[in-house]
Image (cartoon, coloured by chain):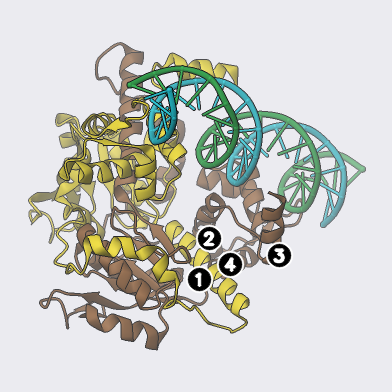
Chain colours: A yellow, B brown, C green, D cyan
Amino acid sequence: MIIGRIEREHKGQREIPEPTLRRLPQYCHYLTTLIRDGVGTVSCSQIGAELALPPIQVRKDLQIAGIGGRPKVGYSVPALVNALETYLGWNNAKEAFLIGAGKLGTALLGYPRFSKFGLNIVAAFDVDPAKIGQSIRDCLVLPLDKLPDLARRMSIHIGILTVPAAAAQATANLLVNSGIVAIWNFAPLTLKVPKNIIVHNEDLYSSLATLSVKLTKALRASSSASGEPRAYDISGDQQAVKIRESVTEDSAEPLGKMPNPFA
Amino acid sequence: MIIGRIEREHKGQREIPEPTLRRLPQYCHYLTTLIRDGVGTVSCSQIGAELALPPIQVRKDLQIAGIGGRPKVGYSVPALVNALETYLGWNNAKEAFLIGAGKLGTALLGYPRFSKFGLNIVAAFDVDPAKIGQSIRDCLVLPLDKLPDLARRMSIHIGILTVPAAAAQATANLLVNSGIVAIWNFAPLTLKVPKNIIVHNEDLYSSLATLSVKLTKALRASSSASGEPRAYDISGDQQAVKIRESVTEDSAEPLGKMPNPFA
DNA sequence: TAGATTGTTAATCGATTAACAATC
DNA sequence: TAGATTGTTAATCGATTAACAATC
């Protein structure tokens, strides 16, 4: 374990724990709204209150990310946003290919703001002749067999994999052979890749399982508590507890067309 | 802390850690392929090899989920699948509403197999008149203001929130007021809800951040290792290490149209 | 039987939380 | 200054991993 630490420190870059990493974009999102409102400084407590996190955790996260504040004053909002965005690589978006221009692929292409979050999808690929040649959200769909050559010539390192599970492994192999270093995998399947390839799995079904079990437990708890088989009792006093503060802010804004899910 | 444990045990239901929970669907997926191939028993090592997990972790997970095997023999595949699917609630799908029939919402509706994974989306809602009345994948889009009444009459407890961030909080409030108990939130925003409401966040941007930082680190590591500024050296010997076994299995299957991402 | 595999208890590791000192 | 807030070190908690006994 001593060796482990030495090795890590030797790399020069501090290891950020993944949970911390996942919270950084949330901080960014909130801080951006503060900038819009002209707020100059924030404290950990404020951030924590907004994101439902303990203040100490916020402080620790920022510290781990190498960001400092000033006692009593707090953190400078612009400096904080800048440091976070730089750390997250949002200032210079990386280029990526998307493979599989189906439903999900199209949905992802429909988020033009991805480029604001460090990811620039420059081309899509598919094997379906009906899709090839089409443009989805300004992104041209190309035949898959053009990928290897293009990936190398354009030095693309990220592949977004939105193909059917049955095709996922074969496609991943192709990506790896084309010089792709990181795969954002949306197929519910463990890809087998060389160990220096980064695979990041986005498994909706694992996520759904979590939700489902939580819900089952909650329903069981509430029914056993009240004695009645299915009494959720939502309408009452719980509302008052916390909702009020938030309703005022956002009020009854309509849904709209959902071009992208960002404010 | 003693109180905590007593309380938990008193609930009758063992707490399953979330990481374990997230792995259960992966076990299911692999086990299903085994059933298809007529395999009767598996060991933890086999499962672990397939999913890139240490065998001890698999064993522990199954144990936590209350599933037993037999020394030397392993686990009965059908019994295992059955126990997992029951635990995950896949045998009796829960009904859900989807709110926000935009790109992402449509993509989710395009996964008819969701019902096999415990979730049955019975209606979609939107405020866009152009969408209302349309059917997306056999799912009717209804006006949002019909939701409260329908949710109560149909006893719907799950809401899938795929509206723009700006509308998310207001919509969440509406859901809570309609008796929804669990919200699957796809907006990159921390919803403020009463504390007995379950919110499950699906934040692609947090996920992307993880991928992005991992990639940056990997690129930096590989470039500093080789001395050259950007030398990824993918094509060489790494391939041989692990890919081979998997290529043979799936080979050059075409991508297809991606109706859903399951095998 | 011998050996493989599960079951179970203990050790390790990492993230969260707490306590308190430092500082503006 | 006094008090709020950050910085830092220690304690706790939970998940992973290891060790070994039980068993087929």
Of tags 3 and 2, which is closer to the observer? 3
In the rendered view, tell whether residue A222 sits above or below residue B229: below
Q: Which residue matches tag 4?
A: B87
* Alpha carbons under labels 4 and 2: distance apart: 11 Å
The chain letter under disc 4 is: B
Q: Which residue type does callout 2 highlight? A: Cys
Q: Which residue type does callout 3 highlight? A: His
Callout 3: helix, strand or loop? helix
Tell me which corner region of the image, top left, top right, bottom left or bottom right, holds residue B157: bottom left
Percent position (x, y) of residue A227?
62, 82
Tell me which corner region of the image, top left, top right, bottom left or bottom right, holds residue A120: top left
Percent position (x, y) of residue B162?
27, 64
Residues under numbered marks 4 and 2 in contact, where contact means CB atoms less than 8 Å apart: no
Q: Is the same chain shared between marks 1 and 2?
A: yes
Q: Which residue matches tag 3?
A: B10
* Alpha carbons under labels 3 and 2: distance apart: 29 Å
Residues under numbered marks 3 and 1 in contact, where contact means CB atoms less than 8 Å apart: no
* Alpha carbons under labels 3 and 4: distance apart: 19 Å
Q: Which residue matches tag 2?
A: B28
Residue at image location 44% in from the left, 77% down from the top: A236
Q: Which residue matches tag 1?
A: B90
Percent position (x, y) of residue A106?
19, 57
In the rendered view, tell whether residue B133 sits above or below residue B75: below
The chain letter under disc 1 is: B
Residue at image location 13% in from the left, 58% down from the top: A131
Of tags 3 and 4, which is closer to the observer? 3
* Alpha carbons under labels 3 and 1: distance apart: 26 Å
Of tags 4 and 2, which is closer to the observer? 4
* Within-10-Å neighbours for mark 4: few <14, some 14–19, many 20+: some
Callout 1: helix, strand or loop? loop
* Alpha carbons under labels 4 and 1: distance apart: 8 Å
Horizontally, residue A210 falls left or right of residue A145, namely right
